[in-house]
Amino acid sequence: MNIKHNIQLQPYNSFRTKAVAKLFCEPETEAELSEILQTYADEPKLILGGGYNLFFTKDFDGLVIKPAMRGIKKLSENDDSVEMEVGAAENWDDFVSYCVSHGYSGVENLSLIPGTVGAAPIQNIGAYGTEVKDVIVSVRAVEMASGESLEFSNAACEFEYRNSIFKRMRHYVITSVVFRLSKSFAYKEKYVDVGRELKDLSHPTLRQVRDAIIRIRTRKLPDATLLPNAGSFFKNPVLTKEEKERLLAKLPDAPVYNVGENDFKTSAAYLIEKAGYKGKRKGDVGIYEHHALIIVNHGTENGREIADFMREVQNTVFRQFGVMLEPEVWVF
């Protein structure tokens, strides 16, 4: 089963914080994963993808599982669409590049999002007006308690904004994802920044849309290999009508969007910037100077420093504007 002992997890999280896992494995098949889960049934377990949505504040006294299932397999195809099963360990942006190069549309707006294919449904990753739930047909996973292989339909995944059954329950290890992509493409503006980037093109191609999004993300977001970070750190808050009115009384220019009958979304980045944190640094941790939604690590290997800074930002925003920011990133 190739179980390793006392493995340093610093290379496996994009914040590069130090922690030691008592046990570590990289199963390549569902059968191997099932055997590991049953053999180590009593150990606490943590599932690692690309490590871009978590960081460590202490050692992990249990089993870290990093799925290593790879491959892109075409399941079906007709004149309009194609369905493909993709291994959980495949790099997400490599998969997007594969789709664009083959003329398959549906994931191009999710270009340059770091991480693995298996992690994408957990967070229901989204960007520039697109969420991954829009192209997922089903998800294969192994239940940690029993080692049983299961298949979840799109509806069974219970997708919500940056959420799913896999994030809420943490009972499953995703092994592969089935996507349905379109074989045709006509650009429709979903996001102002992308429209602005493509303004000189009357009929942008799939490749041109991907390239535009890569340029935007490269300008806005720091390279985690040069400045460790986990991308967007906080969710955009969803407010009740009363919370929205209280916020607008304090910040009349706050961006607010209707996302339901009585629910409203605002910008976490806007609130963080208004609280005075954009570009602010405390010791080796700070907010990125070009994007207020990103916490960056300037040199610490201690995750507790990042967690402390996170709580400071949360408390300041709540104290000033009455909105509690919820992290997208998991803290261990």
Image (cartoon, rainbow, N blue to C red):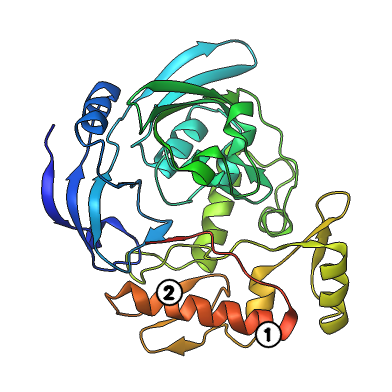
Q: Quadrant of the N terminus?
A: top left
Q: Which mark is residue 273?
A: none
Q: Tell me the quadrant of the picture where the C terminus can be found.
A: bottom left
Q: Where does the image place residue 241, in percent across and percent down from the top left?
A: 87, 63
Asked whether, in this view, residue 202 is left or right of residue 3, the answer is: right
**Considering depth in this image, is 295 or 218 the residue closer to the camera?**
295
Q: What's the residue type where badge 1 is placed?
A: Arg
Mark 1 sits on what residue? Answer: 319
Residue 287 visible, this angle: no
- Does residue 249 show up? yes
Q: Dot 2: what SS?
A: helix
The circle drawn on residue 307 is 2
Above or below — where is 230 with respect to 98?
Answer: below
Label 1 sits on a secondary structure element that is helix
- Return the disc, 2 or 1, that comes first in the chain's sequence: 2
Question: On the rendered structure, is 325 left or right of 238?
Answer: left
Q: CA distance from mark 2 to mark 1?
A: 18 Å
Q: Residues within 10 Å of mark 1 (few under 14, many from 20)?
A: few
In the picture shown, does residue 311 fall above or below 201?
A: below
Residue sitting at x 29%, y 76%: 302
Determine whether 269 is above or below 32 in the image.
below
Q: Residues within 10 Å of mark 2 (few under 14, many from 20)?
A: some
Residue type for callout 2: Ala
Q: Nearer the viewer, residue 39 or 112?
A: 39
Task: Give how far across and how far down residue 120 sits, in percent.
Answer: 49, 42
Question: Residue placed at 63% from the left, 78% from the top?
Answer: 272
